[in-house]
């Protein structure tokens, strides 16, 4: 049965994107039979999670004989995702990829799943100590924050002076806090006459995010730049800049279509791409191989997945990549082959994840 891709804005409730194995590819189906697996994400409506789902589904398709289900709440709601994850453990007994924005509340549910014998891969947010989850696929988010700061500094000239405001949608989420810390530390080191204001809470809900950034722009009208570390930050900052004819720099993370449009028209100077499709693919491919070839024993540690910069030089290429899951897979395939071909080279101690 062919899996049906749905858009990120699919509005049919908290359960979405039911995928079944189909198609052909380069995955290793191993010696096992049909597998029941799935992925849980923090917010099925936002681009970052949608990209991870598409990558995970692509890996399941290529591996063949995998019934794969994706769940997530329509808005960022940790307790709602916990319930969906727990429901998923009843059917996806051969393995689950777990992405969330509130690791502490998943400690017990994840440990319970592991105790049932379900292999769990942590995706994008490193697991807590008590979760019994020992394998994590994610970016070096501190380094991605450094990357955004350095791109801003290229455009601010020598020895800039003034304020730079930083926004974090969900303070307390390790990956987002690490990005903000990377931005702040880089400015403090390389531009001592820049004063960092924030990080401010900007919320993941697009409407709340817009209101939060509007308030910060009004409060800091002479700022040099406004930099966000989340999905909605990017396109809402661009929208506000256009509305106010702002001269300050704006940028953020992820590759929502509105964000890519903002880079294309020059409103945002860059977007930092955590390459969520790639992470979703890698985490699921490794999970499937571990179940089929290693009796479900996953690697131990942090599998480092790369990210990159989207700017005027490559924006058309990235827009083309984002046209379909098939186009994304074709673009990522050389990287997928390289990383899966030498997994040990990507492994780091879990305690070093940031």
Image (cartoon, rainbow, N blue to C red):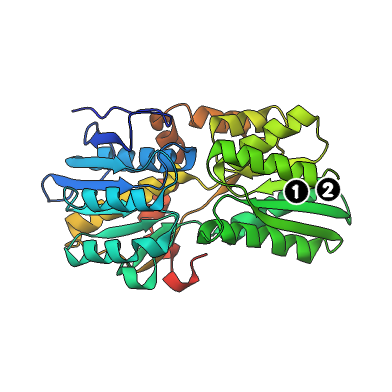
Where residue 196 sits, quadrant-wise, is: bottom right
Left or right of 349? Residue 317 is right
The residue nearer to you, when weighing 82 against 288, is 82
| Circles 2 and 1 in contact, beta carbons < 8 Å | yes
For the point 34% across and 43% down, the residue is: 56
Q: Where does label 1 land, which residue?
A: 152
x then y, percent, for residue 95: 23, 54
For the point 83% across and 36% down, the residue is: 247
Report if residue 78 is visible in the image.
yes
Left or right of 40? Residue 167 is right
Location of the N terminus by quadrant is: top left
For the point 31% across and 42% down, the residue is: 71
Left or right of 207? Residue 102 is left
The residue nearer to you, when weighing 223 against 186, is 223
Report if residue 312 is visible in the image.
no
The residue nearer to you, when weighing 105 against 285, is 105
Q: Where does label 2 land, which residue?
A: 156
Q: Above or below — where is 61 with respect to 340?
A: above
- Graded by Cα atoms within 10 Å as few (under 14), some (14 to 19) or many (20 or more), the crowding at tag 1 reads many
x then y, percent, for residue 288: 24, 51
Gap between marks 2 and 1 measured at Cα: 6 Å
Where residue 124 sits, quadrant-wise, is: bottom left
């Amino acid at each position: 049965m062919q899996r049906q891709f749905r858009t990120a804005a699919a509005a049919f409730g908290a359960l979405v994107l039911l995928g079944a194995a189909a198609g052909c590819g380069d995955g290793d189906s191993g010696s096992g039979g049909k597998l029941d697996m799935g992925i849980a994400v923090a917010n099925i409506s936002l681009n970052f999670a949608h990209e991870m789902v598409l990558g995970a589904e692509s890996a399941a398709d290529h591996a063949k004989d995998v019934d794969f289900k994706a769940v997530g709440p329509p808005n960022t709601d940790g307790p709602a995702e916990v319930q969906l994850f727990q429901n998923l453990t009843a059917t996806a007994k051969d393995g689950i990829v777990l992405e969330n924005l509130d690791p502490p509340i998943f400690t017990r549910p994840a440990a319970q799943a592991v105790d049932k014998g379900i292999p769990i891969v942590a995706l994008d947010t490193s697991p807590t100590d008590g979760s019994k989850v020992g394998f994590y696929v994610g970016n070096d988010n501190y380094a991605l924050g450094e990357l955004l700061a350095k791109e801003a500094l290229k455009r601010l000239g020598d020895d800039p002076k003034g304020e730079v405001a930083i926004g974090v949608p969900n303070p307390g989420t390790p990956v987002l806090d690490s990005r903000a810390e990377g931005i702040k530390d880089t400015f403090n080191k390389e531009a001592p006459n820049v004063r960092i204001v924030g990080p401010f809470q900007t919320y993941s809900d697009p409407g709340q995010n817009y209101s939060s950034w509007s308030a910060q722009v009004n409060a800091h009208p002479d700022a040099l730049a406004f930099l966000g570390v989340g999905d909605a930050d990017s396109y809402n900052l661009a929208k506000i800049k256009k509305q106010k004819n702002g001269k300050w720099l704006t940028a953020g993370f992820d590759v929502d279509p509105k964000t890519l449009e903002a880079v294309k028209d020059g409103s945002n100077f860059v977007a930092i791409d955590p390459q969520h499709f790639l992470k979703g693919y890698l985490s699921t491919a490794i999970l499937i191989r571990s179940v089929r070839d290693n009796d479900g024993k996953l690697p131990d540690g942090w599998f480092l997945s790369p990210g990159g910069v989207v700017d005027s030089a490559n924006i058309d290429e990235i827009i083309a990549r984002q046209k379909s899951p098939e186009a994304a897979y074709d673009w990522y395939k050389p990287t997928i082959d390289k990383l899966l071909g030498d997994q040990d080279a990507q492994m780091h101690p879990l305690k070093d994840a940031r």
